[in-house]
Image (tube, rainbow, N blue to C red):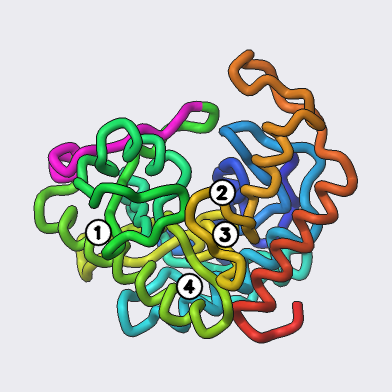
Amino acid sequence: MSTLDLPGYTHVYSGKVRDLYAPVGPDGEVVPDQLLLVASNRLSAYDWMMSPEIPDKGAVLTRLSLWWFDQLSDLVPNHVVSTDVPEAVAGRAVLVRKLDMLRVEAIARAYLTGGGLEEYREKGSVSGVPLPDGLVDGSKLPEPVFTPTTKAPVGEHDLPMSPAEVEAELGADVAAEVSRLTRAILARGNEIAADRGVVIADTKVEFGVSPDGSGGLVLADEVLTPDSSRFWPAELWEPGHPQPSYDKQFVRDWLTSSESGWDRKAGGPPPELPAHVVEQTRAKYVEAYERLTGETF
């Protein structure tokens, strides 16, 4: 995983798909309260980094997140300081406030699918929240449900967290606010997406707080993108089976198909993505952006 030489910035950290750089002031000292968040074209699936990268993915996620931050600004403040960034990362980076990030993956589900469906079939609940009988893959839930997980290190799996575990990590008041805001963001997202023919089945959001403890929760990282959410074409939504999607589920489906030849349970790395999967994945991301924003990418 190579890092960029960005004048005026020093590399701080690289995650699965994002790189962080700290601004360096004229005095040569690191600016303590800001970071440059760079979205790469890397894609992860089933906790593996895929190869090759997906062209334009970082720019799509950055532009879509900025668009959503505007749509959500009355619900929760966000971390964006400026989009004036070095030319080498223009379009796929933002200068943001440096926050103390909460150690919980805040996830909300408006429709039943994926890991939530597996738990429902076994226990009739999702993250301990009882659900009505008779739901199937793709069923709309009565209202969005908060289903948090741990934040696992790179290469390890996130694990479901119970309400008691979230409260123990965050405190009761912050845990309640994280739950409320995560569900409100998904609900607002679906209100807006419905007019554009898109269903947002579930989403993951990140929150942080100011290091000095002032203010409340701040929405950080990305929001309502194809990497952090499941997007379905509304006109094709039909409960009872997996739905077509605009997100990296397309890559997951190829990995588990006979064409890939990969045995996920064997523990070995997945194969390289063929050119047609890379091209179609890029097209899915761009279509999601254009359909939601009404803008041409």
Q: Which residue is mark 4?
A: 80
Q: Which residue is mark 3?
A: 37
The circle on residue 178 is 1
Question: Whole-percent x and y of residue 50?
Answer: 72, 37
Badge 1 amino acid: Val
Q: Residue furthest right?
A: 275
Badge 4 amino acid: Val
Q: What is the quadrant of residue 87 in the picture?
A: bottom right
Query: Can residue 222 be spotted in the picture?
Result: yes
In this view, 110 is above or below 259: below
Q: Which residue is mark 2?
A: 242
Dot 1 falls on a residue whose secondary structure is helix
Cα–Cα span, label 3 and label 1: 22 Å
Dot 4 falls on a residue whose secondary structure is strand
Nearer the camera: disc 3 or disc 1: 1
Q: Please report the residue visible at 28 percent of the width from the left and 54 percent of the height from the top.
A: 146
Q: Please report the residue visible at 72 percent of the width from the left and 57 percent of the height from the top.
A: 6
Dot 2 falls on a residue whose secondary structure is loop
Q: Which residues are magenta?
A: 156-168
Badge 3 amino acid: Leu
Nearer the N terminus, badge 3 or badge 2? 3
Callout 4–callout 3 Cβ contact below 8 Å: no
Q: What is the quadrant of residue 111 in the picture?
A: bottom left
Q: Is residue 72 left or right of residue 243?
A: left
Nearer the N terminus, badge 3 or badge 1? 3
**Is residue 164 highlighted in magenta?**
yes
Cα–Cα span, label 4 and label 3: 10 Å
Residue closer to the observer: 12 or 143: 143
Nearer the camera: disc 3 or disc 2: 2
